[in-house]
Amino acid sequence: MARLIKTIRLTLALVFENKALFLFIYTESKYLDKHHLGLILEHEDKSVVGFFRQLLAAVSQLKLTEKENDLAANLITFNVVFLALKSWNLRKTSLEENIDYITSFIIQGLGLDYSKLGK
């Protein structure tokens, strides 16, 4: 589980540091034709979502079905871009506080006790 937590935290930080790029991707991908958008989404599914699927499957405390694992991996992938998409509205808290909260939110959403793990 430590690997999953570390990956979530590092991904949140990386996405925030590159928020302009992620905002561009999310706003401009609508202009791609179906074929090229499909290629990009397929690549994301195999790489990013696939990596989170593997991490989730390795957490012994989780007893997820294949469908649950797939949904959880997709939800995590979406949640880690939240800071880039909504950073304009989250200025009252520090980046570290936001990373702590979102990581805790994801881990607890999986039914795991983040309070006992810390960072």
Image (cartoon, rainbow, N blue to C red):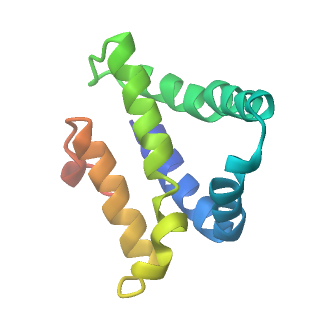
Q: What percent of the width, then of the height, locates residue 86?
A: 46, 70
115 to 37, vertically: above or below: below
Q: Residue at x 56, y 55 (%)?
A: 10
Find the residue positioned furthest to the top: 66
68 to 2, vertically: above or below: above
Residue 73 in sight in this render: yes
Q: What percent of the width, then of the height, locates residue 5?
A: 42, 46
Left or right, 78 with respect to 28, comes to: left
In which quadrant will I find the C terminus?
bottom left
Q: What percent of the width, then of the height, locates residue 63?
A: 26, 17
Pick the front one: 38 or 80: 38
Q: What percent of the width, then of the height, locates residue 95?
A: 46, 76
Q: Residue at x 53, y 46 (%)?
A: 7
Find the residue positioned furthest to the bottom: 92
Q: What is the quadrant of residue 62 in the picture? A: top left
In which quadrant will I find the N terminus?
top left
